[in-house]
Amino acid sequence: MPTIEELIKTKPITDPYARAMLNIIYTGSWLVNNVNQTLKPHGITEPQYNVLRILRGQNGEAMNLFEIQNRMLQRMSNVSRLIDKLLDKGLVERKECEENRRMVDIRITQAGLSLLETVEVPLAAHMNNMSTKLKKEHAAQLAQWLDALHDD
């Protein structure tokens, strides 16, 4: 198994915090690229998948853009553009909020739910691949360590 130094072709990194940070950035990018490659044949990106997952978790209830943006894994300013693309694909629906016309309610469609079911099969293969490389208890410990890094 190659080290981070071998992967990014650099000299040994002696500062353990710098090495950990670079490894997290590299690994995060690697994981997102793998997920995007899995989602590409289905016509969606990882951020679009993330929006669909968030909306599915609402069990048919609508959300506004601000709520969606706050729950995204990668917070970005172009959530409305992501929603527009999902609208064009028929995966979500948008409706003006009756109480505040500047607010928009967004809800996942049946087509969006079906797409999530379809893509979760190949995405599960990534988790199975991870389970061949990491024991369950190591994955749990890694998740705890990563939780300790962020404070928001």
Image (cartoon, grey):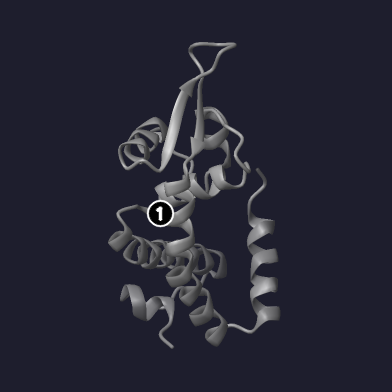
Front-most of residues 60 and 144: 60
- Whether 53 is drawn above or below 41: the answer is above
Q: Position of residue 79 (x, y in %)?
A: 42, 35
**Residue lying at 53% horizontally and 36% vertically, measured from the top left:** 68
Quadrant (top left, top right, bottom left, bottom right) of the N terminus:
bottom left
**Residue lying at 45% horizontally and 73% vertically, measured from the top left:** 13
Helix, strand or loop at disc 1? Answer: helix
Tell me which corner region of the image, top left, top right, bottom left or bottom right, holds residue 144: bottom right
Disc tally is: 1
- Whether 22 is drawn above or below 97: the answer is below
Answer with left or right where residue 59 lies relative to residue 94: right
Quadrant (top left, top right, bottom left, bottom right) of the C terminus:
top right
Tell me which corner region of the image, top left, top right, bottom left or bottom right, holds residue 7: bottom left
Q: Position of residue 19 (x, y in %)?
A: 49, 69
Q: Amino acid at mark 1?
A: Glu
Q: Which residue is mark 1?
A: 46
